[in-house]
Image (cartoon, grey):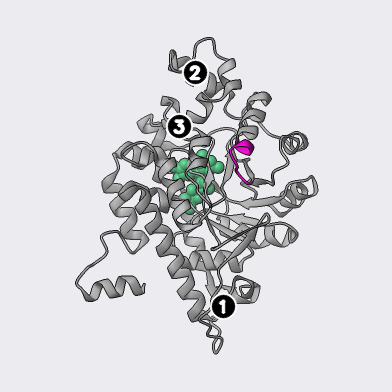
Amino acid sequence: QTEIYLAGLSGVVPSLPMSFADLERRAEQALPPGTWSYVAGGAGDEHTQRSNRTAFDHWGLVPRMLRARTDRDLSVELFGTTFPTPVFLAPIGVIGICTQDGHGDLATARASAATGVPMVASTLSQDPLEDVASELGETPGFFQLYCPTDPEVAASLVQRAEAAGYRGIVVTLDTWVTGWRPRDLATSNFPQLRGRCLATYFSDPVFRSRLEKSPEDDPGTAILTWATMFGRPLVWDDLAWLRSLTTLPMVVKGVCHPDDARRAVDEGIDGIYVSTHGGRQANGGLAAIDCLAEVAAAVPDVPVLFDSGVRSGSDVVKALALGATAVGIGRPYAYGAALAGTAGVVHVLRTILAEADLLMAVDGYPTIADLGPDAIRRT
Ligand code: FNR
């Protein structure tokens, strides 16, 4: 903020957007229409997607006075690592379609390295998971798994992630089938089906062993083979097997019911990730933020990650007050990548974090530990 105001004194105004509304408008202008629909769109009539946003308005933070501190601390601990801030980059499989050079995964990883904000790298990346990991620098990352039907391919992906230095595995549970997405159906725009997000698969030795011809020689068959094995219909009985694939911390993504959260932790899962996938998978559901407090209360013994609808620093602070350990940024950083690659992602993260920090300062919550249930009211 100070940086921007000081530059303003010399007549320099920021070239990148300062509000989410402006960011969204400019990203829509920057991206081809089909790409925009794919990234911005959601399931059904997008009711859940809208609710993810509007539900934040039902929550209000309570200002507390005479607690001003200049040594504010936004750091959080996740699975034994201390991160400087409570936000992370949610997995966005097709981030490569948002950047001009197609290497959105690498651009995002560089933004993670530059800011210390950890990245959850998606299974569906346009660069192999090892290449993404090598751009993360000193910032530990996490690997997100869409669990394939072929158990040996699943094991291979997890073992590669472990070998590449990722510090945890995030298993997404809500996407074993793809949601009903009218915008994509209308444009037949599903980037994965053109193989643009399959670099991690195509470089996988076990996946390759399932093909008669290499993905380089016969990409069409490789894409079809991927499509037939994309989503394992996971049930509770699979959890022990999944857990056995790695000693890394394992988080399950897409959990919105406290009983599911509790059972997953009781069965060996190390963290719970509350998310409605940004309203892309199921429509007609509750807003993710409205599920958070109950889930967090059910699993006080593990970290709780959260995403869906976070657009600003105040959204981050509200999610923390409702029990999140760390808060995921999704579409906003994809829009930042669309406007300016790594610099755009860094800009989005910095604006959200600056707002969160200033809000915590003004409202008298100098550390995240101060942000308990008493800091927030349902209005
Ligand atoms: C996603 N998301 C997602 N999640 C996941 O577990 N693996 C993935 O590969 C993807 N891919 C993906 C692509 C695109 C274009 C979007 C917008 C989202 C979901 C993502 O991690 C997160 O849950 C949502 O983005 C959160 O919602 P908002 O805040 O972006 O609206």
Q: Is residue 49 visible?
A: no
Disc 1 to disc 3: CB gap under 8 Å: no
Q: How crowded is the residue under tag 3: few (<14 C-alpha within 10 Å), some, or many (20+)? A: many
Residue on which the image places disc 1: 365
Q: Amino acid at mark 3?
A: Cys
Q: Indicate left or right for 132 with 172 as reference.
A: left
- Dividing the picture into quarters, in which one does residue 312 lie? bottom left
Is-magenta flag for residue 29? no
Query: Does the beta carbon of the residue at mark 3 sit less than 8 Å from ligand 1?
Result: yes
Residue on which the image places disc 3: 197
Residue on which the image places disc 2: 222
Identify the magenta region.
Answer: 161-167
Seen as rendered, the residue at the extreme top is: 212
Quadrant of the drawing holding the C terminus: bottom right
Q: Position of residue 101 (x, y in %)?
A: 32, 37
Q: Amino acid at mark 2?
A: Ala
Secondary structure state at the residue bearing disc 2: helix
Q: Nearer the viewer, residue 193 or 302?
A: 302
Q: Is residue 257 above or below residue 370?
A: above
- Dividing the picture into quarters, in which one does residue 10 lie? bottom left
Q: Is residue 212 above or below residue 234?
A: above
Secondary structure state at the residue bearing disc 3: loop
Disc 2 to disc 1: CB gap under 8 Å: no
Q: Position of residue 290 (x, y in %)?
A: 59, 60
Is-magenta flag for residue 166? yes
